[in-house]
Amino acid sequence: MTKTDSYFGKKELYAVILLAVMSFFLFADQNLMAPNLTQIGNEFGFTPEQRDVKLGGNISFVFWILGGLVTLGIGYLTDMMSRKLLFILVIIIGEIPCILTGFAHTYEQLFWLRAATGIGIGGALPLTYSFIGDYFSHKNRAAAAGFIGLAQGLGVAMGQLLAGAIGPTYGWRLPFIIVGIPNLILIILFALTVKEPQRGISEESLHDLIQEGKIYTAKINWKYYKELFKIKTNIIVFLQGIPGTVPWGVFFIYLNDYYHIEKGYTVMDATTIVMVVGAGAILGGFIGGLIGNKVYNIKPRYLPLLCGSTTLLGIIPMAILLNFPPYQQTGTVMAPIAIGFFTGFIVTITGPNVKAILLNVNTPETRGSIFSLFNLTDDLGKGFGPVIISFLIVLFGRQIAFNIANLFWLVCGILLLVMMITFPKDEARLRAILEERAKALSQ
C-alpha cells in the first residue's frame, strides 16, 4: 500500500487497532440480555408474553431509537469539532450505564439504563467511520470497514457467549459489569496516545496538498447537510437499512430463547447456535470487505451487485434455521450450528461494503453526518424490528412471526441491486467536487 493509496503508517495502524478493540467491548454489550431473557423475565414476574414485549420489544426499541436520535447530533458535531474529544465523551457516556445495569433492581431502572447505553454504540459509529474515511483511500475502505466490523462482530459474539456461560450460574447482571469496565481504561490510553487524522488527507486529489501543509477547511453546514438527501445512493442506503435490520432482531433478541423453549435445546446449546451465527457473521463481514475491495477495483458497480445478491441468498438458510425440527426429533445440535454459520456468513457480506459505498460518495466534512443518518435508519430497523416481531408473535406465534421477519431481506436485497445504477454516478460526482476543491486549495 502506497501513501497515495492511504495515509497510513504505524501511528495510524495503532489508532485503528485501538478503535477496533474499543469497538469490540462497546458492541459486547449489545445483546447481553438475550441468553437470559427468560431469567430476567422471571425475576421481574413477567409472563412469557410480557417477557417478549417488555424485554425483547420495548427495551430494544428504546435502546436503538434513543441512541439513533442522539447520534444525529453527534454525527453533526463529528464534522464540526475535534473527533478525538467527542469520541472520548461518547465512550464514557455509553459505558457507565452499561456497568450500572448490573445493579438494576427494577424494570424501570433496567429500561432507562439500557436506553442510555444505546447512546454509546450509536454515537461511536459516525466517529469511527469518519476516522476510517481519513485513514484509507477509496480503494481500501471496504477492507478497513470489514476490519472494524470484525471487531464489532467478535464483541457481539463474545458478549452473548459470556452471558450464556455465566448467566445461569452467576445471574444476568454480572456480564454487564465485566464488559463495561475495559473501555473506561482504554479510553484513557486513547486520549493519551492517539492523534486525530487530518480531514481529507486520504483523498487522491487532496493528499499531496495536505502533506505540503495546505489545510482542508470545509466543514458541515445546513446547505451541505441538505445536499446529503440529494445523493441517490444515500437515499437507497437509508431505505434498505430499515428492513435489512429487522431479521437481526430474531437472531439477537429471540433466537436464543426460541431454540431453548420452542426447540427444546439447553440454554448453552441455544447460546452456542446463536454464537456460531455471530461467528459466521464476523467472518462474513471481514471476508466480505476483502471481496468487496477486489470487486470494486475491477468495476465499482460490482460492489452493490455483491451486496444485493448475497442479501437475497441469505433468506434461504435463514428459513431453514427457523423451521428446523425440535431437538427431540433430531437429537442433533450440529445441523442448526452449520446452517446458522452459513446464514450469518452470507448475509453480513453486505455490511462493510455498504459503509464503503457511503464513504465513497460523501465528502470528508459530511461523513460523520451521513453515518449518523445511516445509524438512525439502522437503529430504526433494530428498534422497530423487535416491536414488529413481538406484535407478530402475539398474532401468529413465534415461528410464523420469525418467518415473516426473514422476508424483510427481500426488500433490502432489491434496493441494494438498484444501487448498481446510482453508485458509479454519485462516486464520479464526489471526485469532481474534490478535484475542484484541490484546485482552489492549490491556489
Image (cartoon, grey):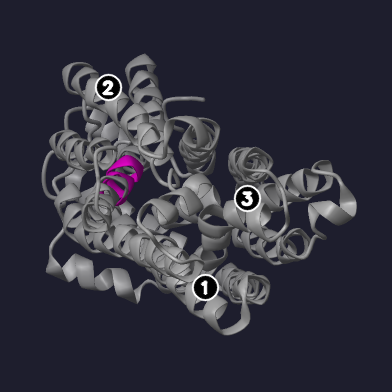
Residue drawn at x 24%, y 37% is 95
**Residue 428: in magenta span:** no
Residue 228 x, y percent position in the rendering: 30, 68
Q: Residue at the location (33% across, 56% down)?
A: 371
Closer to viewer: mark 2 or mark 3: 2
Q: Determine the residue located farthest toward the right in the rendered image.
A: 330
Question: In 3D space, how far apart are the residues under numbered discs 2 and 3 (Cα atoms)?
Answer: 29 Å
Kindly report which numbered mark, 1 or 3, lies closer to the viewer in this rendering: 1
Q: Mark 2: give few (<14), some (14-19) or many (20+) Cα within 10 Å.
A: some
Query: In the image, what residue type sits under mark 3?
Result: Ile
- The answer to whether any part of residue 388 appears in the image is yes
Task: Check residue 389 in the rendering and tell me which mark sits there, or answer none.
Answer: 1
Disc 1 element? helix
Judging depth in this view, the residue of 401 and 64 nearest the camera is 401
Where does label 3 land, which residue? 349
Q: Mark 2 points at which residue?
A: 186
Residue 410 versus residue 8 in the image, above or below = below
Q: Where is residue 164 in the image (x, y as percent from the top left)?
A: 54, 37
Residue at image position (30%, 49%) is 126
Q: Write down the region rendered in magenta.
A: 122-129
**Residue visible at 22% across and 54% down in the picture:** 75
